[in-house]
Image (tube, rainbow, N blue to C red):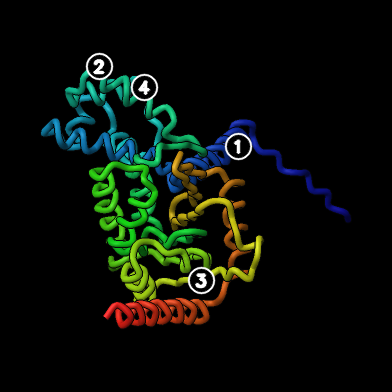
Amino acid sequence: MMVVRTPTVKPARQRNSTRLGTMLFGLQRLTSECMNGDPSTPYSRDLGDELRQIRERFTTFRARKIAKMLGWDPGKVSNIEHGKVRATEIDIIQYLGRCGRSQAFITDFLERYRSAFNLYFVQVPTNLRTMAMAESVADKITTYDLTNIPGLLQSEEYARALYEARGVLTPDLIETAIRFRMERQAIMRGHNRPACTFFVHENALRLKVGSDEVMEDQLMRLLFHTHAIRIVPAASGPAGVLLAHYVLWEYEKRSDVAFTESDLAMVFVQDDLGVKRCKSIFARLDALALDEEQSRSMVADLASRSREDLSGRRLYLA
């Protein structure tokens, strides 16, 4: 005897409940993914930190206190001050108003804040705060320099000779820039220092900046660091000559950022295609550059020659 099984049909209320549960699970998962991500940019984190500093400097309010005064959840203040969410203009006006800032200050801040989350943004080269903040929290830093020793590796004397030779800054600004550059180098000595790879073109090693003593000291300085130095040899020809200074900051929990600069502007790129392009540039340099041991040998040889030339000149002068 054949038994015919009739398909079980769930009641409409049960079907709707199941469908609603699936939708809520999907929404919960999406919300969780968004909260675990970090859509911030270097500039949004910079401006968020500026807001925190304003609160701490001009008020006695803790984050929870100002949140209560504004009728916000405490998490909202934290996210805005960390640059993780884009505050509305009304939010910024209310926040800065509670901090006692003037209308002129608020207007200026709003003008800057409008570009805080742009995936491409440009700053003047004298505004170094955003760059320093992006650099200081990176887990990995990769750079390329054609004509100069990388800023994170420069000696104070080399940096001063470089700024003076360019003749762009006044003496006061030169001293400020040098002090800032030396302070930036603290990240290289920290316990959780980033993993750094510096691609340096051979031209930068051979270009004389300052006196012979300055160059000898700078070359010797390159030999006593734990980071990776990769020399792009002049023999690589045009393939190893790139038209700009490039930096890639990589983060464990944030989007990676590409960076380039000139005497006219600094450009920050968080767009996926731009970052991918920057990574492809470094992949090409990795194939062209000498390995770490070969690079150290070249630096040591040039430092030795510089010392010999300097000693010879001293004997000649004697």
Q: Is residue 36 above or below residue 209?
A: above
Q: Nearer the viewer, residue 73 or 273?
A: 273
Q: CA distance from mark 4 to mark 2?
A: 13 Å
Between disc 2 and disc 1, the foreground one is 2
**Residue 230 marker:** 3
First in sequence: mark 1 vs mark 4? 1
- The answer to whether the residue labelled 1 contacts the one labelled 4, judged by CB atoms less than 8 Å apart, is no
Q: Earlier in the sequence, mark 2 or mark 3?
A: 2
Q: Nearer the viewer, mark 4 or mark 2?
A: 2
Q: Secondary structure at mark 1?
A: helix
Residue beneath the point at 51% across and 39% down: 119
Residue corresponding to mark 2? 103
Q: Earlier in the sequence, mark 3 or mark 1?
A: 1
What amino acid is labelled 2 in the image? Gln
Q: Which callout, 1 or 4, points to the residue nearer the camera? A: 4
Give residue 64's position: percent from left, percent from top.
20, 36
Residue at which label 1 appears: 19
